[in-house]
Amino acid sequence: MDLLYDYQNNIALYSKFHEYFIRFQPPALIVWGDKDPYFLPAGAEAYKRHIPNATVKFYDTGHFALETHAEEIGADIINFMDKLTIR
């Protein structure tokens, strides 16, 4: 319950997250269950407002995407990381 209650602190920090994304444009892979009843697909797409080059991937699942699609998401993470260059 403490973790759920603490979520309000994340929301209060959203503007700082957005500033960071805009300033640094970090490589980003956004993985999302397209049937998540809590975090809707529009929430994933919203990342592209601040990180236009973000990769957004949807999976045929709900909120606990890693529990149902660990192998597929894991492979996508490895492929994403393989494309990054060390600066």
Image (cartoon, rainbow, N blue to C red):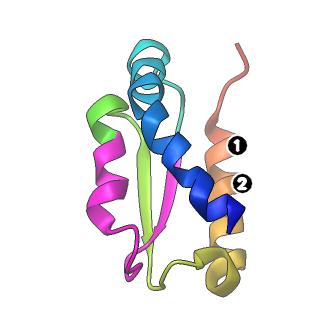
> Badge 2 local density, few (<14 within 10 Å), some, or many (20+)?
few
Whole-percent x and y of residue 9?
A: 54, 41
Q: Is residue 69 above or below residue 28?
A: below
* 1 and 2 marks in contact (CB < 8 Å): yes
Task: State the CA–CA distance, disc 1 to disc 2.
Answer: 6 Å
Q: Mark 1 highlights which residue?
A: 82
The residue sitting at 40% across, 73% down in the picture is 38
Kind of residue at disc 1: Asp
Residue 78, numbered label: 2
Whole-percent x and y of residue 46?
A: 29, 47
Q: In this view, does 17 lie above or below 73?
A: above
Kind of residue at disc 2: Ile
Tag 2 secondary structure: helix
Task: Locate the C terminus by quadrant.
Answer: top right
Q: Is residue 77 left or right of residue 60?
A: right
Task: Locate the N terminus by quadrant.
Answer: bottom right
Tag 1 secondary structure: helix
Q: Does the magenta stretch include residue 53?
A: no
Residue 18, numbered label: none
Picture quadrant of residue 43: bottom left
Picture quadrant of residue 53: top left
Q: Range of the magenta residues?
A: 29-47
Which one is in front, 9 or 50?
Answer: 9
The residue sitting at 60% across, 63% down in the picture is 4
Q: In this view, does 19 lie above or below 32?
A: above
Whole-percent x and y of residue 25?
A: 46, 22
